[in-house]
Image (tube, coloured by chain):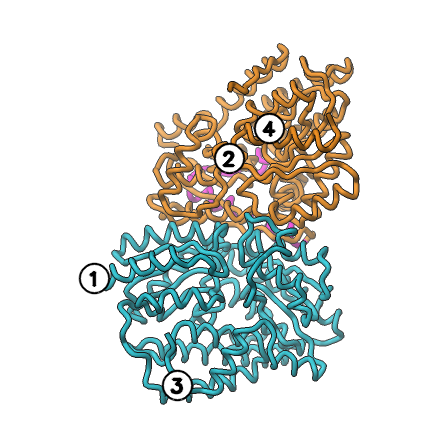
Chain colours: A cyan, B orange
């Protein structure tokens, strides 16, 4: 379903999201700019941008198979990692000057190991140690301080390898810049609270994805223009049967969104990596004396996080419950990749929570790129019809 | 077809196994039902926490994942527990051992603890169970402490972990009413150091050609010293007897009774719960002797520095991050994981290395090429199976046997 957005800037952002590379990246490089790839949202863009780099979130857009990556990763590894690594082996990420991988789940963490030995053009690869615990009373500051030290190491790595200086004023400036992005994205999300939102979930996802693949200053300007364009859009026709919230890892496959839209479901809010979780929660303190500490705090304590983080489930539930009320959600979709144990387990607990709360809940296990959609579509259709029958 | 071959143990090892059973029965875990009946406070924790603290505080504890092993798989109820977990609609590809542990938890089959202690390692599956322990059902309100372990292994990281672990003392005192005594703690740690040294010495003996004992003894020794009688004199004495018996066999150049050793290999993962259906057949058919597994392997495991409370915890952290089986290999770079396999192959004169490729070990699955390349360079045959070391329904042990047979044959080892 398309909303009928008539906006040049939307077309531009959708174009960026639809391809791995884009004209913004090409222009950036032509001007001598360097690009740093990264995998998980807890790797702070603020530091990368403060070094004068363009941060690029790795994704497997357009990938159709994993045959190259399967030499490095087993089929027991998730398809997100395999599609992304396949792209890397095919040279799709050759525009990267460096890569930062985090110590998140067992699958993405091993990207670091394999990147080092694979025949890839980008030789600089860094492993950022991110804490995997949150919410332990009395230990928060210890954990934040540890992550701050790890961020300082990452900063030094970038400084030493590229001869740049990442200063406190530069960090403050980029915190402000990224906070503005979050604020603008939040405004975009808020447009979806209404009965007939002017932008669909798939379109929204494209806009968010583009933001992690182009210079932030330009992106913020584009978001402002888009928000202005959307103010005059009448909104999608309210012919959907259910307002849905979707939870899980990033959704970067437009086919997956279309399965909901085709079956009468409208995803109005999410809790996904690089989705609402990134922009709806608190912002980084722009005035903090120690910006690195502020960045560390945001990523350790403030954002409801990846299920790989011990203690994150409680935060996730709070966030989901809050969003459900604000966005008038009729049902919840828990979607995750096959082989993703942290999300899989989290969905089991979420199922119990939703059952207790009497909220319709559907669990979907899928591959990163949808190939066999028939069964998924049938389950989604049945779920939406069930909700429709209850209303 | 009956594929099980009865393994005969020589008398001294029969005795040692009986004594090992006694250590287990006398352990906190072995007496758990008594504690439950008497209402004694119990601690539930992840298996990567050190038992020395509980021993020093005389605080009954159990490892949740060990319950999955003993109360489910060793009790013949593994498949039931795995299927039970799957009904809960959790992670379909979760490690079957963790599935079994999670099942016991959500079915209220584990003793309700007075406190929960967790550390953020080592694999995704452990995190999944940690989160269940924190959030599910009747345990939701149980006081808990969750400690963050660094992936980094430098001095600052050891201090980071040690500093957090110290916080478990006031936490446990408050949650259980038990008192901590530094002097007692030091005594336990010193006894634990003796056990660790014996584990190392025992490992050295196992390099002998022919191998004096089966690989399972490495795991049994680990369980005896770490799980059942950590820091207890009775555990040290038992370990000493195991060492002495094995040293005698080495001196006499005795190999495994009834086996003519022709192929020496390592099974680089946890020993399967269905070992009886595999290893004896390989011994009889090919003279193939398994020398080592992941839990039976003691990598550099630093002593506990008992000079102060801080030094104890920092050295515990060091031991944990760079020595603890599986944590060391999984919660580290692939080169450490593969490097250990290479060290075993070299030091134990292995003719071949078998990586079971346990379905739950996602990090291992992402390391196969790196490890394979290491062995290609060394010229040692290397094989990845892709089985489930706990749940034999995933890949029938007969299929595993056939695969290994073919591997031995095609590698020119037969």
What residue is pinned by disc 4? B401
* Quadrant of the rendered image containing residue B266: top right
Looking at the rendering, the stretch of residues picked out in magenta corresponds to: B156-185
Residue drawn 67% across the image and 55% down it: A114
Disc 1 crowd, CA 10 A, few/some/many (<14, 14-19, 20+): few
Give the percent coordinates (x, y) of residue A377.
36, 60
Q: CA distance from mark 4 to mark 3?
A: 64 Å
Q: Nearer the viewer, residue B373 or B166?
A: B373
* Quadrant of the rendered image containing residue B296: top right
Q: Nearer the viewer, mark 3 or mark 2?
A: 3
Residue drawn 59% across the image and 32% down it: B188
Q: Nearer the viewer, mark 4 or mark 3?
A: 4
What residue is pinned by disc 1? A389
* Secondary structure under the numbered disc 3 in the rendered image: helix
Give the chain letter at badge 3.
A
What residue is pinned by disc 3? A230
Residue drawn 34% across the image and 38% down it: B107
Q: Nearer the viewer, mark 2 or mark 1?
A: 1
In this picture, residue B31 sits left or right of residue A243: right
In this picture, residue B355 sits left or right of residue A313: right
Q: CA distance from mark 1 to mark 3?
A: 32 Å
* Residue B177 among magenta residues: yes
């Amino acid at each position: 379903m398309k909303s009928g957005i008539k906006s040049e800037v939307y077309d531009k952002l959708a174009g960026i999201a639809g391809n791995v590379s884009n004209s913004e990246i090409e222009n950036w490089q032509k001007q001598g700019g360097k690009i740093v790839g990264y995998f998980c949202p807890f790797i702070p863009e603020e530091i990368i941008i403060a070094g004068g780099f363009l941060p690029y979130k790795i994704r497997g857009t357009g990938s159709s198979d994993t045959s190259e990556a399967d030499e490095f990763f087993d089929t027991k590894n998730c398809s997100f990692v395999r599609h992304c690594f396949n792209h890397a082996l095919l040279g799709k990420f050759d525009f990267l000057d460096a890569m930062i991988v985090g110590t998140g789940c067992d699958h993405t963490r091993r990207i670091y190991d394999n990147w080092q030995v694979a025949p890839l053009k980008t030789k600089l690869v860094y492993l950022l140690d991110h804490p995997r615990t949150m919410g332990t009373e009395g230990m928060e500051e210890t954990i934040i301080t540890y992550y701050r030290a790890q961020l300082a190491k990452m900063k030094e790595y970038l400084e030493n390898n590229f001869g740049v200086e990442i200063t406190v004023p530069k960090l403050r400036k980029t915190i402000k810049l990224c906070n503005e992005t979050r604020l603008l994205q939040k405004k975009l999300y808020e447009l979806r609270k209404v009965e007939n939102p002017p932008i669909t979930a798939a379109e929204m996802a494209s806009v968010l994805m583009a933001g992690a693949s182009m210079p932030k200053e330009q992106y913020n300007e584009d978001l402002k223009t888009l928000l202005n364009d959307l103010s005059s859009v009448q909104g999608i026709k309210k012919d959907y049967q259910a307002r849905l919230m979707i939870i899980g890892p990033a959704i970067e496959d437009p086919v997956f969104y279309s399965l909901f839209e085709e079956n009468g479901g409208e995803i109005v809010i999410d809790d996904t990596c690089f989705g609402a979780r990134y922009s709806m929660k608190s912002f980084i303190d722009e005035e903090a004396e120690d910006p690195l500490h502020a960045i560390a705090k945001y990523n350790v304590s403030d954002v409801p996080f990846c299920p790989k983080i011990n203690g994150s489930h409680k935060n996730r539930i709070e966030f989901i419950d809050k969003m459900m009320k604000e966005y008038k959600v009729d049902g919840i979709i828990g979607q995750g990749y096959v082989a993703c144990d942290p999300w899989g387990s989290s969905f089991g607990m979420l199922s119990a929570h939703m059952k207790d709360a009497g909220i319709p809940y559907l669990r979907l296990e899928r591959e990163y790129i949808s190939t066999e959609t028939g069964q998924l579509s049938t389950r989604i259709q049945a779920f939406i019809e069930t909700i429709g029958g209850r209303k | 077809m009956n594929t099980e071959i009865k393994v005969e143990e020589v008398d001294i090892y029969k005795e040692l196994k009986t004594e090992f059973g006694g250590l287990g029965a006398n352990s906190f875990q072995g007496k758990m039902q008594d504690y439950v009946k008497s209402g004694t406070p119990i601690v539930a924790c992840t298996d990567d926490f050190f038992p020395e603290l509980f021993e020093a505080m005389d605080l009954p504890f159990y490892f949740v994942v060990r319950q999955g092993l003993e109360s489910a798989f060793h009790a013949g109820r593994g498949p039931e527990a795995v299927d039970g977990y799957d009904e809960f609609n959790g992670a379909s590809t979760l490690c079957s051992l963790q599935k079994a542990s999670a099942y016991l938890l959500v079915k209220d089959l584990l003793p309700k603890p007075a406190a929960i202690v967790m550390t953020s390692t080592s694999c995704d599956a452990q995190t999944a169970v940690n989160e269940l322990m924190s959030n599910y059902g009747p345990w939701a309100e149980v006081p808990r402490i969750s400690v963050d372990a660094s992936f980094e292994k430098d001095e600052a990281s050891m201090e980071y972990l040690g500093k957090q672990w110290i916080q478990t003392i006031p936490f446990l005192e408050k949650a259980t009413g038990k008192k901590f005594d530094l002097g007692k703690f030091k005594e336990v740690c010193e006894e634990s150091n003796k056990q660790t040294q014996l584990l190392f010495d025992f490992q050295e003996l196992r390099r002998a050609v022919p191998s004096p004992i089966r690989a399972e003894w490495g795991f049994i020794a680990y369980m005896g010293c770490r799980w059942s009688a950590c820091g207890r004199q009775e555990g040290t004495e038992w370990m000493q007897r195991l060492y002495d018996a094995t040293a005698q066999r080495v001196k006499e150049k005795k190999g495994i009774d009834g086996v003519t050793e022709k192929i020496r290999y390592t099974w680089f993962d946890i020993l399967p719960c269905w070992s009886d259906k595999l290893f004896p057949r390989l011994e009889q058919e090919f003279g193939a002797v398994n020398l080592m597994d992941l839990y039976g392997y003691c990598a550099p495991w630093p002593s506990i520095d008992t000079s102060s409370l801080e030094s104890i915890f920092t050295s515990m952290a060091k031991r944990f991050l760079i020595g603890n089986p599986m944590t060391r290999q999984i919660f580290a770079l692939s080169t450490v994981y593969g490097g250990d396999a290479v060290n075993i192959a070299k030091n134990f004169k292995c003719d071949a290395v078998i990586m079971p490729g346990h379905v739950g070990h996602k990090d291992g699955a992402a390391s196969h090429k790196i490890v394979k390349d290491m062995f290609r360079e060394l010229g040692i045959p290397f094989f990845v199976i892709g089985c489930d070391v706990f749940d034999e329904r995933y890949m029938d042990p007969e299929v595993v046997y056939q695969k290994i047979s073919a591997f031995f044959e095609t590698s020119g080892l037969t």
